Amino acid sequence: MVVETMQALSGSPRLLRNLNEKAVLQHLLAQGALTRAELEAFTGLSKAAMSDLLKRLEKAAFIRREGEKAGAYGPKAGLWALDPRAGFVAGVAVSAHSIEVAIADLSGAVVAEFAQPRRPGEKQWAGDALHAVLGRATQAAGLDVSALDQVVVGLPGIVDAEAGHFRKGQQIPDWQGFDVPAALIDVLGHKRVLVENDVNLVTIEEATRGAGIGVGAMILLWIDEGIGGGLVMGGRLVRGSTGSVGEIGGALIPDWPGGGVTPATAEALLSSQALTTLLRQFGCPGADVAAEIEMVMRDLDTYGDLVEVLAYRIAAVLSGIIGMLDPDMVVLAGKVGIAGGTALAQRVKAILSTLPLAIPKIVPSMVGRHAVRAGAIELALEQSRERVFTGGSAARGLP
């Protein structure tokens, strides 16, 4: 709690004012609209000091008046709320099939969305593509692109998060080596752009708003167009020394238990193409992997053997990871994990339970199909709120 007695500590009055402003803004974000008296009780500031602080934050367009609250005695008290227009962020999800973008205000509310289809293998200059989708989305939100305080771009492959480069990825090879922040600086007016692996963003979203809320150690297995993973330890996303944590597509696993079997890569057994082949082997059309797996899970009498093969492949990929990391939870994500639901998760757990491992809870994902984009928004908001709240009114030109 930030209180006036902090004057006894070393630091300038401006620093203490910034700390008080940040505490109030964070509290309004967490609690919603509050009265001046409620904010005084939270911070320990006097009536005069709080009144001055609220005037400054209102003048800087951080907060706004939002109705009144009836009290037990006396007149109604005015309510103060965070002004969601105090900042805007963008979350972008790039895949072989589309580029999606969402614009959110500082409260986290999505104010505009736009999606641009891509043809797999289509050649495009990444900078032009990003300019186009950000321009369309901000236009829909009634904003200029330069109003975006933070942009996060999710890419399917290995990224250099520090430099902002896309290092490698099979789904969008024409983007390899692309410097994302440099391509956007002209339209944004800044380089507050982060690039992140798409599955890492899904992992952030799952840990923040999905099945992994409050879970200390979580593995997310992404089974979609390709296969990948995400790792949370101690409640924090783990990226590894090169940012390659979760790049498990090249891991060698046996495609079925028994002797004389040549190991295959995880990608070769669980990619969308591999599962299309598997579905056709068991008499399914193989035209829509997610829809057909969902159908298969509802008819185990007919397709029990297919489910057994699928569950084995997933368990084989997970076994070494679980043995090494000892997680509290494994989340099966991507269109296959979601389509398989609880029944597939339980079958995977049953197979793993035959091994000498400490078996964690295994559950299907609870986040939607736009999870990459949603995770990008979550990370962008985290970055923007910290910067905006820390800068306070002084960063907006108030003396």
Image (cartoon, helix red, strand yellow):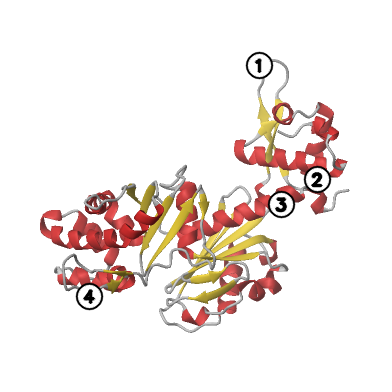
Residue ID at (76%, 41%): 19
Give percent across and percent down for residue 233.
48, 51
Check whether the beta carbons of the residues at disc 1 and disc 2 lie within 8 A of each other. no
Residue type indicated by callout 1: Ala
Q: Which label lies toward us, 1 or 3?
A: 3
Kind of residue at badge 4: Thr
Q: Quadrant of residue 131?
A: bottom right
Asked if 169 appears above or below 213 in the picture, the reply is below
Q: Position of residue 125 (x, y in %)?
A: 55, 82
Q: Which residue is mark 2?
A: 59
Residue position for label 1: 72
Q: Which mark is residue 388?
A: 3
Circle nearer the viewer, 3 or 4: 4
Instruction: Say if mark 2 contacts mark 3, CB within 8 Å.
Output: no
Judged from this view, the residue extending furthest toward the left is 301
**Residue ID at (52%, 79%):** 175
Element at badge 4? loop
Q: Amino acid at mark 2?
A: Lys
- Residue kind at label 3, given as amino acid type: Val
Residue 45, x across and y down, in percent: 78, 29
